[in-house]
Amino acid sequence: MARDKLTDLVGDILKRNGIDRPVDADADLVNQGITSVDMVQLMLAIEAAFDITIPQSGITPENFRSVTTIASLVNKLATPAEAAN
């Protein structure tokens, strides 16, 4: 599912930053240790992983607040088959 893949992507970024703990899907990503540079890397990783393009209008703090909010955005942008992967 999209949420699981997103959790893995966030976890990978956190590990690169030396933070090795479970990712809480509903927790604020900034509070978990994601920086603004990490957000850009995450956005690019999401586009590649789900074969989508996030429009400028979709790049908002609300959409990138947590894994759950990102999953909602991905589900809106992806076809049903892409979102399931």
Image (cartoon, rainbow, N blue to C red):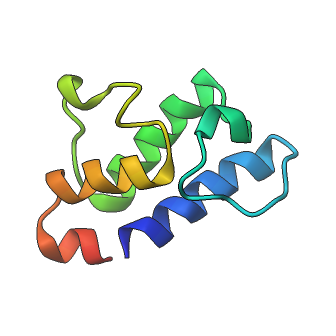
Residue at the far front: name it.
Answer: 26
Task: Answer above or below: position of 76 versus 42.
Answer: below
Residue shown at 56%/57% (left/top)? 9
Task: Answer above or below: position of 35 versus 54.
Answer: above
The x, y position of residue 5, in whole percent, is 47, 68
**Nearer to me, 56 or 71:** 71
Q: Is residue 5 left or right of residue 80?
A: right
Residue shown at 60%/47% (left/top)? 27
Quarter-of-image position of residue 18: top right
The x, y position of residue 62, in whole percent, is 37, 31
Residue shown at 48%/52% (left/top)? 67
Q: Is residue 41 left or right of residue 61?
A: right
Quarter-of-image position of residue 20: bottom right
Residue at the far left: name it.
Answer: 79
Q: Quadrant of the C terminus?
A: bottom left
Quarter-of-image position of residue 35: top right
Q: Is residue 17 left or right of residue 82?
A: right
The x, y position of residue 2, in whole percent, is 37, 68
Residue shown at 43%/66% (left/top)? 3
